[in-house]
Every structure is written in C-alpha cells, then in structure tokens.
Image: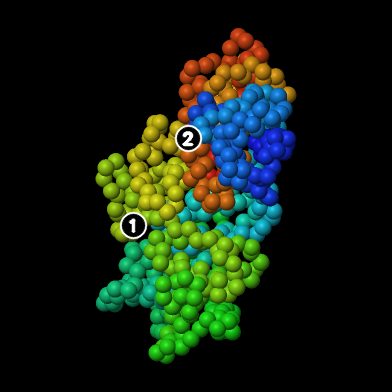
Amino acid sequence: MIDALKAKLIESLLTAIKQAGLEAGLPQDAPASLTWEYPGDPAFGDLSTTLAFGLAKTLRRKPREIALQIAASAVFPSELVDRVEVAGAGYLNFFIARPFWRHLVQEILRAGPMYGRADVGGGRRVLVEFVSANPTGPLVVVNARAAAIGDAIARLLEAIGHRPHCEFYVNDAGNQFRNLALAMEVRCRQHLGEDCPMPEEAYPGDYLIDLACEYLERHGPETLSAPEPERRDRLGRFAVEQILQWQRASLEAYGVTFDGWFSERALRERREPERVVESLRERGFLYEHEGALWFRSTAFGDDKDRVLVKGDGEITYFLPDIAYHQDKFDRGFDQVIDLWGPDHHGYVARMRAAMQALNHPPEALRILIVQLVRLMRGSEQVRMSKRSGQFVTMDELVEEVGRDAARYIFLTRRCDSHLDFDLELAKSASEENPVYYVQYAHTRLCSILREAAKAQLPAPVSEDDLTPLDLQEEIGLIKQLALYPELVIGAAQALEPHRLTTYLHDLAAQFHGYYTRHRIISADRNLTRARLALVAALRVVMANTLGLLGVSAPERM
C-alpha cells in the first residue's frame, strides 16, 4: 500500500510541477529518481521528499522557493493526504490522512500470511550455498551462525519472488579428505593395540574413535591390509558418510534443510576442473611459469595471479572451487550467493576474478563473510566442548539454549560483524533476551485475542470499522506495520536478515508500551473491536517476520 501511495503522490507532484512551469528541471526518469524518506520525528510528517533540491540545480533557484510553489499548486486526494508542509531549506513533508492508515490494517487482515510478500524477483533462480563445512567432524558454533543466516536469506528471497535453491558443498576430496582418512586409519590401528601416533596434520577429535570402532565392526580389521590408496579411500568414504549423517541431522534439528548436497568427488570424476582449465586457456587467462599453470586473476582486480596446477601436476584447491561455481551457472542459476567463513576473506577477489574470466557478470556472484562467534557465559568465555575437547558443537549449543534462541541471536547482527553469544542471556526470561522479548510480544497478542474469544467478542475481520483508532500511538503502530513490505524487499536484496530482528524489536517495544498504557478490551464495544483488529494485524506481521527468520511464533509461553 505504501508503494501505491507513493505512486499517487508522485503523480500529483508531477502534475503540480508542470502546472507551475517547473518541468524544465525534471530529469527524464523523474518518477524513478524521486526518493522518499521516513522522518524520525512525527512533527516532520510521515513521508518526506527532497524533490525541490533536485529541481533547484537545474532551475538555479532556491529549493525552498520551489517547494513552496509546488505545495501551493499540488492537489492531493483528501483520503490520502491530510496536509503538506515545506520545512527547512526545501523539504516537502507529507502528513498522511488517518483513513489511509486504518485501511492498511484491513489490508493486513485480508492478506494474512501473504502480507509482506512480493514478486520483484520475477521467478529468478538463485543458488544459496552455505555452511559447506568439511565432513571431518561435527558442526560447530560458527556453522550454526552461517546456517541461520543462509536459511533466512533463502526465505527472504523466496518471499520476494525468487526461486532459491539451498546447497551444501561436500568437500569429499582433496587434502581434507586425505587427512580424515589418515586419522581414521590411526584410530583403527590404535583400537587394535598398535603403537600408532596421530600425525600432526590428521584430525585428533575423539569422535573418530567411535567411528573407527564402527568401521572395524562392519568391515573387519583385514581391510587395513589392502594397498594404501584403496584402504585410505574406503576409510575416508566411510567417515565422510557417517559425519555427513551427523551434520544433516544437526541441521534438520536446527530447522535447516538443503535442496542439494553437492559432491566435490563427483565434480572431479566428471573432469569438470579440466574443462575449466580449457575454458580459461581459450580465453587467454592462463600461462605457465616455473612449471606451474597460473590464472591471470590480476586482470580482474585480484592482487596477484593464482596457481591452478602445481609443478608436480597436482591441482590446487582453487581449481575445483572454480569448477563448482561454473557448474552452478551451467545449471541455469541467474545468481549465486556464497556464505564463507572468515578464513576465506582473502579468497573472495580471486573467485570473483575467475567468474568474470568465465564471462559471468560481476553481480552474478555475491559472497558474504560470516564472522566468528565468541561464546560467553556471563563474563566468562566458553572454550571447550565435552565431546571433542576442542570446540563447542552446534548440537551442544542448541541443546543448551534451544533452536529459536540460537537462530534469533545469530540474526541480530550483520554477518560480517563479530558476535558475542551469551548463553545465560539466551536462556533467560527477561527483556534483555532479544528472542524472549519478541516472542513474548507475540504471545501477548495471542492472549488478548483468546481473552476476546472467551468474552464472546467477534473475531477481528477486515470489514471492521476502525475509525476509533485515533491515538497517535495507534497510528504509530500502524505506520510500523506499513513499513514491513519495503523492509522485506530491502532485507532480501541486501542479503541482510538482521534488519528483521531490528524491526521486530522496535515493533515489540512500541506494542509493549501501548499495551501498558491502554486497555484493549473495554466497555466501549466499537473501540474494543477496532483495537482487536489492530492486535490481530500486529500478530500477523510478527508471525510473518519470525517465519522469515526460521523462528517459531509461540501462542503461549
């Protein structure tokens, strides 16, 4: 509705400009270039535009003079605009009529779960790759943060009309795989009583002891007598399969499911890296130096060129990654979004260079860095895991604080910001706990509607008369609800789900304040019905927003 309002205001403004003889100052894309602001102070209206400043540059007149002339000439529908004021050096401030805001509550009740959804994506296919942890151990806390962010981004993209595909890239080949297989063999031999120390490059986690025992039970110790390539491959495959089962179960318990699990091993077996080499060679972006094959990534802004094939013929880990990203586009995705850990920050420029070298536009690949999480218990940092002795697992985190708290708190900050996660705060039933504060507001809204039903009051419907909603606080709440569709589009396009948690906190704070000062259910039947409609609209928006975050909207707490 806000978009429709803006379109009508623009139409009236353009008509006024032409009537005032000011059209010479309009750019060719005048409707698209006209920007709006939401004043923080209600004294400056509900919508504000700097239109007069743009005209002043061309007309060489003072912006305030132009704004006054436009305001005097413009005619706006009375059901939309109460008045227009000129402020400061030339701002046009619009005070929107209250019937418009009341009508918006009715629109929300009609739309229900669809309120806030849009079709700006036009069905474009987007691949969102996130988590993609090495299948060498349980998922850890930073994986939990990436999972919450990636899943929320996919939900946002779907809400605005894209077709997202969530994918987990399985690193089941290369050095990580070889080191895992080595660790498995060591654990198996240790279990059989052999004196076999763990090499420094292998994985020392105790979880591999159980996996080694299970492997020996299933396949027998005689399999350790097979030639090294065969036995290591078998050990590695077994470990990857089991660890992926752990990871999948952890993610599903966390509310995150993937549309695809993409195997690096399969990519290599299809010889996709070799095809990438040929494509880059044909385009003139490869050269040989000191026996190695180099990619000329500096041609696309990278700080140095990158080796793809070493002098001994072994490929670097960068080459399969390029092949994987090329495969994403080969599958018909219009855009690719990656969420990477902080240790991959220096990797961004080279991957962007590779995609441009393969003829993909820069905007087709978007890479987000998910920063580390520091777990705290009050003022003390939590360092160790009961299971591994080295890290805190996702399962341990969710078991202690719950899925909702974990996901919500991870989404309260930008993904590229470090996050301190206070375990005790996440479990507390207090206003300081952000997820509790928001979910409590939703349960309070549900409780009000239940009390109304017990009092045999009719359930709110979109046809209710909302004229009694006249308090500035009520109009302020409705304005917050009006911002929601734009918020969803903006958060989705910017890949910033933390905007939703900020919005929810502000909306909950406004509602809690309103509730403490005003009775919803009273002897005034008309006022009660109108306020119940507002409560129902608030509940719809809070539930919709929590849903986009992958967090539940409880009706009771």
Instruction: Determine the residue located farthest toward the bottom in the rendered image.
Output: 291
The crowding category of the residue bearing disc 2, from other C-alpha atoms within 10 Å (few below 14, some 14 to 19, many at least 20), is: some
Secondary-structure class at tag 2: helix
**Residue 391, which numbered label?**
1
Q: Where is residue 178 in the image (x, y as percent from the top left)?
A: 41, 76
What's the coloring here?
rainbow
Instruction: Write the residue at 66% across / 37% down.
Output: 6
**Residue 300, which numbered label?**
none
Between residue 91 and residue 130, name the one nearer to us: 91
Against 294, is 12 above or below?
A: above
Task: Say which residue label 2 marks.
Answer: 505
> Can you see residue 438?
no
> Can you see residue 184?
yes
Against 80, is 165 above or below?
A: below
Instruction: Write the residue at 46% across / 46% down.
Output: 411
Q: In which quarter of the image is residue 334?
A: bottom right
Could you tell me the amino acid type at mark 1? Phe
Q: In this view, does 5 lie to the left or right of 336?
A: right
Could you tell me the amino acid type at mark 2? His
Q: Position of residue 409 (x, y in %)?
A: 43, 44
Q: Is residue 297 left or right of residue 453?
A: left
Q: In which quarter of the image is residue 284?
A: bottom right
Against 529, is 396 above or below?
A: below
Between residue 133 and residue 327, name the one nearer to us: 327
Q: Position of residue 124 (x, y in %)?
A: 67, 57
Instruction: Write the residue at 31% across / 46% down.
Output: 376
Instruction: Write the residue at 71% across / 24% down.
Output: 78
Between residue 212 and residue 340, name the one nearer to us: 340
Q: Is residue 141 left or right of residue 363?
A: left
